[in-house]
Image (spheres, rainbow, N blue to C red):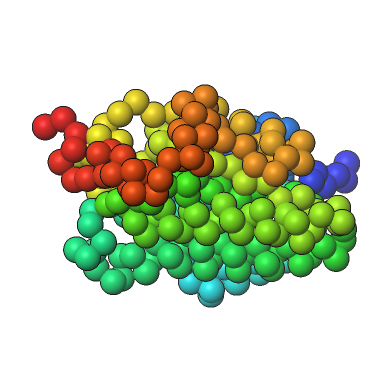
Amino acid sequence: MAYVAKPLAVVTGASTGIGFELARIAAQRGYDLVIAADEPRIEEAAQTLRGLGANVTAVEADLAQLEGVDELYESILTLSRPVDLLMANAGIGLGHAFLDQEVEAWQRVVDTNITGTVYLIQRIGRDMRDRDNGRILITGSIAGFMPGSFQAVYNGTKAFLNSFSFALRNELKDTGVTVTCLMPGATDTEFFARAGMLDTKVGQDEKDDPAEVARNGFEAMMNGEGDVVSGWKNKLQTAAANVMPAGMLAEQHRKMAEPGSGKQ
């Protein structure tokens, strides 16, 4: 019996956390997958997702580099199938004071969160526009609404993505391509350990369930919504950020993210 191709979803940053949960939901909804991350664990994720009945192509590539994005895109082209869903989720954080950070460290945050993400969206988005069909989900953050003391570069990249998603959505409003921005708060993933923030208040506080965050984002994308803030506490925080002075927001963020602000 000939294989009938399922619709195809592409998920970046899919080895763990929100990205893996997005991929899992897509597999459960009947999508085949191309998943990508910059670590070998992407193949472990692929094995798990294949158990849900999806055909899964795993790509280990450095999406902070244009060449890594090209590698992922070429892997998609070999399937000779259109991308129905693009979930651009890859991202990294970086704690501590900006002036104390190594150039290579903060540059990697910018290159991963902004340059690689935008380049991938442009490559796949052009194909979607040519077909007049497709859905794009961008993982922004409520951090993009706050000046991120001791997370300055990361919050800045998320402010960029939040803004970029709404601009792209408007540019595509007369097409069959939708753009949705998922804006989670602190989520129970490896983010804070990787960012060197386990000694901070935000690093130690209770966090949102990545499966729930992913479900909210996936549903918003499928409904064609412009954005979704996951979690009622995060909704309140976002509403407050829209009216509080920037200096007050920066001080509030400092209390959460300054090294040593957590319990000793």
The residue lying at 69 percent from left, 36 percent from top is 220
Q: Is residue 124 above or below residue 57?
A: below
For this view, does 35 lie left or right of residue 264? right
Residue 147 visible in the displayed image: yes
| Quadrant housing the C terminus | top left
Rendered position, 258 above or below 72? above
Q: Nearer the viewer, residue 97 or 13?
A: 97
Q: How far across and how far down the image is residue 116, in percent?
A: 53, 66
Q: Nearer the viewer, residue 250 or 135?
A: 250
Q: Residue at x 15, y 41 (%)?
A: 260
Q: Residue at x 43, y 40 (%)?
A: 244
Q: Residue at x 79, y 46 (%)?
A: 7
Q: Is residue 57 visible?
A: no
Q: How many marks overall?
A: 0
Q: Provide residue 234's location: percent of width, then percent of height.
A: 48, 31
35 or 126, nearer to the observer:
126
Query: Which residue in the rendered view is the most extreme toward the bottom?
Result: 67
The image quarter containing residue 256 is top left
Residue 175's spot in the image, x, y percent? 86, 56
Q: Is residue 111 above or below residue 234?
A: below
In the displayed structure image, the side of residue 124 where residue 211 appears, left or right: left
Task: Give residue 78's quadrant in the image.
Answer: bottom right
Q: Position of residue 149 (x, y in %)?
A: 30, 51
Q: Quadrant of the N terminus?
A: top right
